[in-house]
Image (spheres, grey):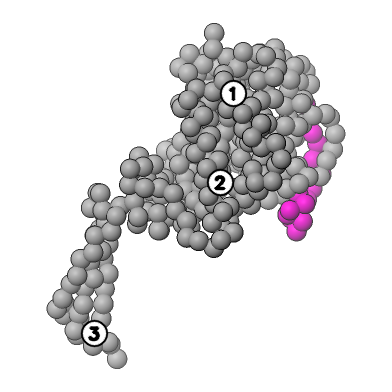
């Protein structure tokens, strides 16, 4: 038997606010309705940010704990901010502030939100990010977005934000276009196909250590008819060795701390080489390096100093996996005195620190 009295709620986006209309019916005949206006920012925060921006993400929590417990965190922050333009310093400090708020309020069990209506640009970006997946088409287990075909769904940082490469100077983008790219942590080849089609006229050398992801990478290259991408089923580190890697899809890692935290993950052995040895042996003319290898970035840099010193390529280095990377990678590269300037980019994706990257370029 159907209900005599029913209640229905309809939500409409009205720009600065969201209208929620409550419709009351008797025998399915509408007899009364009530409209509520809910703040545009408040609704987005309630529906999106409280679930994701301050969600329980281990890498985000790891950085917040690092900030809280590291005895010389003030000195590390000073080193991180040294010689940055004010705009770049503000980006870093906003992330740190939100990490501190997250930790404090998680410990006290308080409701958390950060964005306000005056931060509408960020809220609009969040809305656009939410709509990103709506434009992905699935066909025969293949995902399609903007003409890019993948065996797994497209990532927002790679395909919506194009890895934030717009943050680099136009002269840098023009210069690196005519040189080879190094893609460290190639995953399924998603970054490589973007680089090939939009940013690089030469070769892209993409390194993926895990067998399963490498197999999917080959599928991606086939689907997109790639001709200038060189896939390498190896990892890059500080020295030539074979080590155990914890296998976890896009988050597979060789970082010992992360592997300890994820003790139930499957593992496999993988071959590690240095970028310096690979570049020498293959006569690579390096113009750009992208690194996202789940907390193994500092080990990679140890085996890439010769290449970076020689070519001074533009670089995108992920710094969101742990506190040490977040605070120490920029000062490390700066200590080499190669003339690098630094910028930061954090995609607006509903998280505090995930996908935060350091952008390095030498301005001639």
Compared with 198, 150 (above or below) is: below
Quarter of the image where the C terminus is located: top right
Compared with 287, 198 (above or below) is: below
Which label belongs to residue 92?
none
Quarter of the image where the N terminus is located: bottom left
Residue at 25% from the left image edge and 49% from the top image edge: 16
Compared with 216, 224 (above or below) is: above
What's the magenta region?
A: 259-275
Residue at 39% from the left image edge and 42% from the top image edge: 122
**What is the C-alpha distance between the residues marked 3 and 1?**
65 Å
Horizontal arrangement in the rendering, residue 292 relative to residue 15 (left or right): right
Residue at 66% from the left image edge and 40% from the top image edge: 323
Relative image position of residue 187 (x, y in whole percent): 63, 40
The residue at which mark 2 appears reads as 99
**What is the C-alpha distance between the residues marked 2 and 1?**
20 Å
Question: Element under label 3?
Answer: strand
Q: Earlier in the sequence, mark 3 or mark 1?
A: 3
Question: Element under label 2?
Answer: helix
Relative image position of residue 79 (x, y in whole percent): 64, 27
Residue at 23% from the left image edge and 71% from the top image edge: 22
Question: Element under label 1?
Answer: loop
In the foreground, 53 or 153 = 53
Relative image position of residue 87 (x, y in whole percent): 46, 27
Q: Earlier in the sequence, mark 2 or mark 3?
A: 3
Horizontal arrangement in the rendering, residue 45 relative to residue 285 (left or right): left
Q: Are marks 2 and 3 in contact (CB under 8 Å)?
A: no
Residue lying furthest bottom: 1
Q: Earlier in the sequence, mark 2 or mark 1?
A: 1
Residue 222 seen in render: no
The residue at which mark 1 appears reads as 82
Relative image position of residue 247 (x, y in whole percent): 72, 49
The residue at which mark 3 appears reads as 5
């Amino acid at each position: 038997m159907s209900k005599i009295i029913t209640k229905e709620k309809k939500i409409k986006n009205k720009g600065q606010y969201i209208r929620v209309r409550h419709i009351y019916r008797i025998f399915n005949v509408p007899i009364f309705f009530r409209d509520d206006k809910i703040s545009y920012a408040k609704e987005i925060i309630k529906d999106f940010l409280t679930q994701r921006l301050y969600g329980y993400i281990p890498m985000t929590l790891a950085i917040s704990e690092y900030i809280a417990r590291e005895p010389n965190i003030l000195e590390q922050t000073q080193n991180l901010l040294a010689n940055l333009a004010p705009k770049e310093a503000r980006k870093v400090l906003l992330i740190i502030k939100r990490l501190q708020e997250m930790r404090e309020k998680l410990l006290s069990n308080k409701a958390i939100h950060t964005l306000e209506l005056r931060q509408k640009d960020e809220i609009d970006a969040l809305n656009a990010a939410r709509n990103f997946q709506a434009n992905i088409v699935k066909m025969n287990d293949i995902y399609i977005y903007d003409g890019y075909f993948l065996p797994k769904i497209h990532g927002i940082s790679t395909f919506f934000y194009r890895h934030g490469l717009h943050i680099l100077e136009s002269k840098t983008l023009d210069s690196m276009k005519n040189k080879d790219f190094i893609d460290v942590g190639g995953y399924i080849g998603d970054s490589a196909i973007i680089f090939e089609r939009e940013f690089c006229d030469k070769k892209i050398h993409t390194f993926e250590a895990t067998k399963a992801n490498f197999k999917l990478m080959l599928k991606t290259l086939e689907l997109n008819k790639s001709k200038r991408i060189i896939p390498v089923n190896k990892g890059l580190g500080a020295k030539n060795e074979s080590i155990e890697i914890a296998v976890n899809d896009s988050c597979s890692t060789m970082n010992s701390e992360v592997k300890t935290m994820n003790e139930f993950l499957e593992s496999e052995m993988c071959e590690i080489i240095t970028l310096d040895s690979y570049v020498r042996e293959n006569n690579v003319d390096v113009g750009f390096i992208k690194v996202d290898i789940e907390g193994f970035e500092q080990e990679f840099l140890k085996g890439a100093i010769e290449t970076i010193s020689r070519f001074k390529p533009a670089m995108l280095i992920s710094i969101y996996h742990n506190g040490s990377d977040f605070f120490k990678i920029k000062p490390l590269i700066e200590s080499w005195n190669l003339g690098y300037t630094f910028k930061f980019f954090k995609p607006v994706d509903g998280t505090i620190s995930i996908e935060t990257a350091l952008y390095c370029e030498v301005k001639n």
